Amino acid sequence: MTPQHHEIVVIGAGISGAAIANELLSRSQPVCIVDAAPGPASACSSHSYAIAHPHIGRGSPRLLRLTRIAFLLAEARWGKQWNQHGIFQPTKKDKVFNRDELQEYLRSIDIDDKIAKPLDAREAQALLGIEQSGVWLPRGASLSLAEAANDLLQAHEKLTCLWKTRISRLEASDGKWLLFDDAGHQILTSDKVIVAAAMETKSLMASIDVHLPLKPVRGQLSIFSISKNDAWVPRLPKVALSGEGYCLPAEKLADGSYRWIVGSSFDEGEDDLQARNSSDEFNREQAQGLLNYAEGDVASLRANDSFIGVRCVSGDRLPIIGTLTQRPGIFLATALGSRGVLWSALAAKFIVAQVLEDDFALLARLGFTADLVAALAPARFFAGAFATPSALGALASNSKPILPSAPRAK
C-alpha cells in the first residue's frame, strides 16, 4: 500500500501539537496529526488543573520576556477554556516586601499593573483574604489542557487525524521525510514534519542522528478533602497561589466540605505514573508554606485523588521551539516543562510562522527579537558542534540552567 503523503505532518496531539495544528488550519493549511493514543491529550496534556501566569521571579531575562509574550498569546488563544480567577504570588519567606522596588522591577520587565500589582499584607487580606504580602496577578488563570486540546482538534475538512499510530523513526529521502511505525512500516511521507511529542521527541530525533538534552520530570498533584469545620477552612484561598508549589482556589462542596488541589512534586529524571504517599506528604508541606500556616495540622488534608504527569525539560530549562536547521523540513516543539499552557500558545504562532515562511513581521510585532528566537532554537544545543552556520548559531543560548526552586520529592 502506498503511504499517505501530507505536506505538513504534526507528530503528537498533546496541547502543543493540537495548538500548532489548529493554527495551521486557521491559515487554511491542510495538516495531518498523528498520535499513538486513541485521541488528543493522552499524556501530560490530560492535565485538568494547569495554571497560567507570566514568570516574574528573578530568572533569566530571556525567560521573563518570553513568558510575558507567551502569557498574552495564551490569554488570547484559550478564551473559552480560560478560567480567570487571578493568581497571588506571596513574598518569599527570606525577602522583605518593598513596594517601590517591586514596582520598578515589574516595569523593567515590561509588566504593567494590569498584569501584576504589588500588595502588602493588609491589602492582600482586604482584597483576597490572604494575610501575606506579594504580587497579585489578576489575569492569571487555570484551564483544562485536555478540554483545550480536544476543542482545537474538532473535525475539519483540512484536518487528517491518525490515532493509535506511533511514529518510531524518521528518514530523509529525495527532499521528503519518511515516517515509520513500530513495526518498521513506512506509513507516511511529508515535506515538513513538526515533532511535538514531549519525551518521545528524544528517540525520534536520535533516529536522524540528532541528540537532544531532554529528560523527564515526574510531578504529582494532590486533591485534598477538608472537613467543613476544620481549622484549615478559614485559611483556604479563594484565588490560586503560586510560589513554592501552587494551588487552585478551594472549592466548597454541597456537604460543606472543601476540595483543594495542591502541587506539585518535582521528581527529576523519573517517569513513574503510580501515585505516591510521599508526594502527597510533600504537597501537604507545600500547602502549609503557600498559606504561611506552619501550625496547620497536615493530617486534616486527606488525599482523595491525584494527578500524575511526566513533564519534559531541556538542559537549560527553556523550551525547544523552532526549525531544526541541521535537518531541513523538521520543526520541534518540545521541553515545555510545567508551562505547557504558555509555551504551546507561543509555539503555535512561532512554528507556523517558520513553516509557512511568511509571517516574521507578525512575530516582530509580538515582541520576538533575534535573541529570543535564538533562546528557543534547537540550534542552541549544537553551536560549535554540528550546527550549520546561521544567525541562530551565533546567538545560541549559553545561559545557566533555570533550576526548580522547590526541593526534590521522592
Image (spheres, helix red, strand yellow):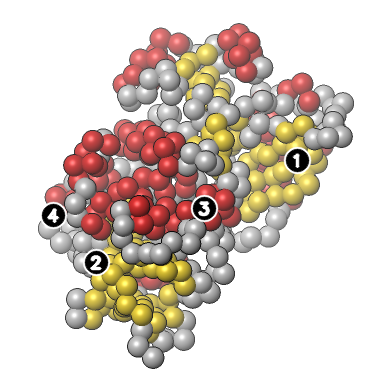
Q: Helix, strand, or loop for circle 3?
A: helix
Q: Helix, strand, or loop for circle 4?
A: loop
Q: Amino acid at mark 3?
A: Asp
Asked if labels 3 and 1 touch by Cβ distance under 8 angstroms, the answer is: no
Count of all numbered marks drawn on residues in the image:
4
Q: Residues within 10 Å of mark 1 (few under 14, many from 20)?
A: many
Q: Amino acid at mark 4?
A: Ser
* Residue for point 13% across, 54% down: 390
How far apart, in angstroms, are the residues tagged by discs 1 and 4?
A: 51 Å
Who comes first in sequence, dot 2 or dot 3? 3
How far apart, in angstroms, are the residues tagged by discs 1 and 2?
A: 46 Å
Q: Which residue is mark 1?
A: 224
* Residue for point 55% across, 31% down: 84
Q: Nearer the viewer, residue 153 or 250?
A: 153
Q: In the rendered image of this protein, does residue 219 appear above or below residue 388?
A: above
Q: Which residue is mark 3?
A: 151
In the image as oriented, which residue stretches furthest toward the bottom?
1
Relative image position of residue 44 (x, y in whole percent): 55, 55
* Residue for point 53% across, 74% down: 164
- Mark 2 vs mark 3: give the one in front: 3
Q: Amino acid at mark 2?
A: Gly
Who comes first in sequence, dot 1 or dot 3? 3
Whether residue 197 is visible: no
Relative image position of residue 199 (x, y in whole percent): 46, 62
How far apart, in angstroms, are the residues tagged by discs 2 and 3?
A: 27 Å
Labelled disc at residue 329: 2
Q: Nearer the viewer, residue 326 or 299?
A: 326
Q: Which residue is mark 4?
A: 390
Who comes first in sequence, dot 3 or dot 4? 3
